Amino acid sequence: MINLAKRDIQHTLGKFIVTAMGVGMLLGIVLIMIGVYRGMMVEVEILLNDIGADIWIVQENTLGPFAESSRVHKDLRDTLYIINGIQKSEAITFQNIQLPHKDKPIRVVAVGYDIYGTIIPIKQERLIKGRELKNDRYEIVVSDKTGFDVGEEIKLGRNLYKVVGIVSKSVSNGGDPLVYFSLKDAQELQFSYSNKEIQNNEARGIKNSESDMVNAIVATVKDGYDIDAIADDIAKWQHKSVYTADEQKTILTKNLIEKSSKQIGLFTVILVIVSTIIIALIIYTMTLEKMKEIAIMKLIGLPNSLIIEMIVKETLLLGVLAFIFGNIFSHLIYDKFPKLVVLQIPDAWILFGVVLIASILASFVGVKKVISADPAAAIGG
Amino acid sequence: MDNHIAIQVKNLVKNFGKGENSVKVIEGASFEINKGEVVALIAPSGAGKTTLLMMIGCVLEPTSGEIWLGEERVYHDKWLIQDTRKIRREKIGFIFQAHYLIPFLNIMENVTLVSLAKGASEKEAKKKAMELLEYLEIADKANNMTSQLSGGQNQRVAIARALANNPQIILADEPTAALDGERSISVIKMLKKVAREQNVAIITVTHDERILPYCDKIMKIENRTVVFHELDEKIV
């Protein structure tokens, strides 16, 4: 039997392809939206995974530095070694700062760590130029997204910091680029006040006693020890809030990006519904354009099944072609977005399934029109 | 039943609407048309030509009466064959005012479509279509699209399509309306040739008096029923 769908598409190939490209761009946006969500999930875990701690000790009754302000004494890292099972323990600081740049300042998250310590948050594979911090004063390692190069100097507070290394794909849970300081520099940036501020505080009887504070203590646990039990011990003993790596991950994903991910999810669902409606409208219009031919086909005795097959095949092909264009489109633009967009093959396959279902649903409007077409419409002009 | 008769209609009635709002369009039409005859159906607009054509073509259900196609009674106060589309596919050919070929199919595909739907193999359908295209002297355009042919050529393709399923009857709805005088005569001559040589009855609705001399009979709808008129001049 003649493939009516193939012949009809060949007859209006340009129009069909342009239509598929239009729907494809919409599906491409759906893929990008899913990619933004995936990117958020990846970004959330970058710093956690790079630090690789089993336990996070933060200020009592707080969720830790990623969620809210947290201050703990630096010397707690040494005290922790008393606990049986603690393998490594280090003090870490986190703060949002603005790096001065040519046109406008760049918002970054500064991570401070003890460069002579046992837990180094800079992963070697992320270092694409220069080196790690080797001196504990006035050096900085920056993300490539900041636009700084090795050797450049950045003025922050009272001091100049020399860029010694560039890292890539190093972002905070909020998607801001990361920069790394030595713990001393980071503490000074976060807790030291200007001379005038110190004089002002002293006049009010306030002592500047925060110079030895950090935002969290991170620790790893020796093999064979129960991480949860150790976390409970520390919490009771030191009156701190203690989280395991999994709990910290949950805080980041559930508490911090849950709303964003729901928002993206809702947008994605709406886009899929809109795409389905658009495909349905296109098929309806395409069917309307062929009503005379459909009436003739019915009049000369062609069974409905042949005509319906044509409509369904055309709809499915439109969906598949739009899906292919959507993939091409999303892969062409995904790296142009300011935040990380992660395109995953399983997501594309799920969307493919959704597009097929949407196309079948959309074809119903065309099929309904075919069934209701009156063969008598072909007679009488 | 006389096997020369292609179509027989007995006391055919068609009312639109019900009760007080009922409008009688055809009232007790009875006639028979033999195989090989070309019959012109003429009447003023709104007299019921298209209604009659649609009933004979098994597109519109009559209110009552009988319709015989060849030796098979297809309607007797109700359709006797549930799938009227099958009757059309197997017994009736249609030709329209404009050619109404499927624009996205080429000439060969337009002609083979009905045969294939009827269950013929692709080879058989193509062979039959090529024979018809040759018969109608348009075989050289078999692979062209309809948009590449003139109105007269397309109308010949439409005739070929109408013949593709070996019909007993061809119903033509003003087949020459869109053509100039010369082409109109050419098409009616072609239809007459088809009727004679393929032993098919042709009923053609027309307002074109130039083609009447080429017809065997003139059927008119007067006072909601069918009457036959003698031709003043007949071209054999």
Image (cartoon, rainbow, N blue to C red):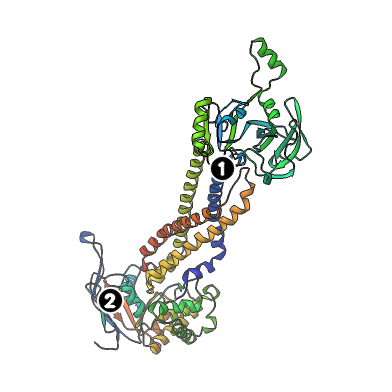
The image quadrant where one finds the N terminus of chain A is bottom left
Q: Which residue is mark 1?
A: A40
Q: Which residue is mark 2?
A: B226
x 61%, y 43%: residue: A339
Q: Measured along the vertical axis of the image, is residue B112 above or below residue A344? A: below
- Outermost residue on the left side: it is B19
Q: CA distance from mark 2 to mark 1?
A: 80 Å
Q: SS of the residue at dot 1?
A: helix
- Residue A210 screen position, x and y as percent: 64, 21
Q: Are marks 2 and 1 on the same chain?
A: no
Q: For the residue marked with disc 1, what is the amino acid?
A: Met
Q: Measured along the vertical axis of the image, is residue B160 above or below residue A377? A: below
Question: Which image quadrant is residue A153 in?
Answer: top right
- Residue A31 screen position, x and y as percent: 54, 51
Q: How many marks?
A: 2
| Viewer-nearest residue: A279 or B96 | A279
- Residue B200 screen position, x and y as percent: 36, 85
x 68%, y 36%: residue: A179
x 72%, y 26%: residue: A157
| Viewer-nearest residue: A267 or A64 | A64
The label shown at residue A152 is none
Q: SS of the residue at dot 2?
A: strand
| Viewer-nearest residue: A264 or B53 | A264
Q: Name the chain under label 1.
A: A
- Outermost residue on the right side: it is A151
Residue A34 placement, left or right of A100: left
